[in-house]
Image (tube, rainbow, N blue to C red):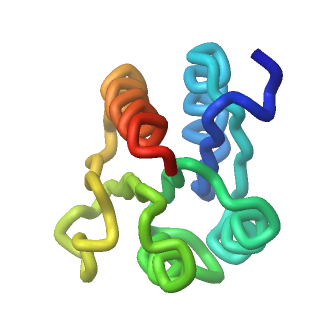
Amino acid sequence: MNDLNKPSILIVDDEPAIRNILDRFLTSGGYRVVCSGNGVEGLKRFQETPFDVVIVDRGMPEMNGEEMARRIKATHPHVPMILITGLPHLIISPQLFVKVVPKPFRPAELMELIAQLTTAACRSGE
């Protein structure tokens, strides 16, 4: 399978360790992964090339994950968004996300969720 046929995942988190761990796990799981360090850059990448799933951190400089999700959902309402956060009590718009994953999390749990989301998208033809 070439890279263009693999489900694409955008990871947006200002913590390099989180980006690196998720990148390694998802790439080894057969996904095409792109990482961004903040919401502004992540939104720009999404606007250039939409992704099958977006994983975004809530608290980031320049643009938080909820604002980024709001902007993506305005033009791509069916793209599944996963929010990862160390401060779940601060979430204002949980309805933007298919799942809120509290930090710390197990990458394997996230992998299982992404597998379900990308399989569902393939079945529905999105």
Q: Quadrant of residue 14?
A: bottom right
Q: Quadrant of residue 124?
A: top left
Residue situated in front as seen by the camera: 54 or 14: 54
Q: Is residue 22 left or right of residue 4?
A: left
Residue situated in front as seen by the camera: 92 or 87: 92
Residue situated in front as seen by the camera: 34 or 125: 125
Task: Name above or below for residue 119 compared with residue 48.
Answer: above
Q: Residue at x 50, y 85 (%)?
A: 74
Task: Name above or below for residue 8 compared with residue 53.
Answer: above
Q: Is residue 52 left or right of residue 102?
A: right
Q: Quadrant of residue 96?
A: bottom left
Give percent across and percent down for residue 71. 54, 83
Q: Is residue 101 left or right of residue 40?
A: left
Q: Residue at x 75, y 15 (%)?
A: 1
Q: Is residue 114 left or right of residue 10?
A: left
Give percent across and percent down for residue 82. 39, 53
Task: Name above or below for residue 86 compared with residue 19.
Answer: below
Residue situated in front as seen by the camera: 73 or 84: 73
Q: Residue at x 55, y 39 (%)?
A: 18
Give percent across and percent down for residue 39. 63, 71
Give percent across and percent down for residue 100. 27, 54
Q: In the image as oriented, which residue stretches furthest toward the left? A: 89
Query: Number of numbered discs present?
Result: 0
